[in-house]
Amino acid sequence: MLKLMGVLFLVTGTIGLSLERIREETKRIKNLKQIKNFTIFLMDEIFHSHIPIPDICEEYVWKSEGSLKAVLEKVSEEYRNHQGKSFEVIWEETIYRICEQEKLSKEEKSHLLQLSRCFGYSNAKGQLSAIEQYLQEVENDVLQREKKFQDNRKLIIYFGVMSGLFISILLL
């Protein structure tokens, strides 16, 4: 009876670990979608309203959540106290600082750093075309991640169950 309870706890624990892995991947996909939505909003505001990028970031803070919200809040705060630094430099420095605190994945960090390279254009057309190319990359990445996740979702759960059963057989 005690061994059976141990086996159940072990299998439940490994299933829990695999569900946590699924939750993390879902969160990463959600964060990439937020970056994509921010990029679309950025393009619209630049094209239609001609608002400066720092003001767009400050405005989008209220529409975002999670790690993107933390990034935009910090960037806006740093820009207000900027001491002669360009917005691109402030953005990159903030991304490096936030990555440690918010536990951004390498892809999220990479995408956010790539976005800063779209800010350095003097005219709106150049900036919009750079952001458009960046948006294509993000959209492709989101689609690839979603496809890969759908393919691997059941596999992750099966491995969780099987590893729990395997470890319990070894222990018995």
Image (spheres, rainbow, N blue to C red):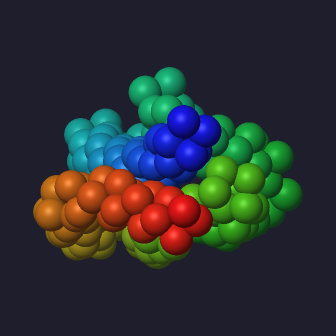
How far from the left and from the top, in percent, is residue 77?
A: 74, 41
| Residue 81, above or below 114 | above
> Could you tell whether 77 is left or right of 48 in the image?
right
Q: Which of 125 and 72 is in front in this view?
A: 72
Q: In the image as oriented, which residue stretches furthest toward the top?
A: 62
Query: Quadrant location of residue 70?
Result: top right
The answer to whether residue 61 of the structure is visible from this angle is yes
Query: Quadrant location of residue 150?
Result: bottom left
Q: In the image as oriented, which residue stretches furthest toward the front?
A: 1
> Could you tell whether 129 is left or right of 21 in the image?
left
> Could you tell whether 59 is left or right of 156 in the image?
right
Q: In which quarter of the image is the C terminus?
A: bottom right
The answer to whether residue 59 of the structure is visible from this angle is no
Rendered residue at 54%/36% (across/down): 1
How far from the left and from the top, in percent, is residue 154?
A: 21, 55
Rendered residue at 50%/42% (across/down): 4
Rendered residue at 85%/57% (across/down): 83
| Residue 44, above or below 150 | above
How far from the left and from the top, in percent, is residue 124?
A: 31, 61
Q: Nearer the viewer, residue 16 or 142?
A: 16
Rendered residue at 66%/61% (across/down): 99
Figure disc tally:
0
How far from the left and from the top, in percent, is residue 86?
A: 67, 66
Q: Which of 158 and 41 is in front in this view?
A: 158
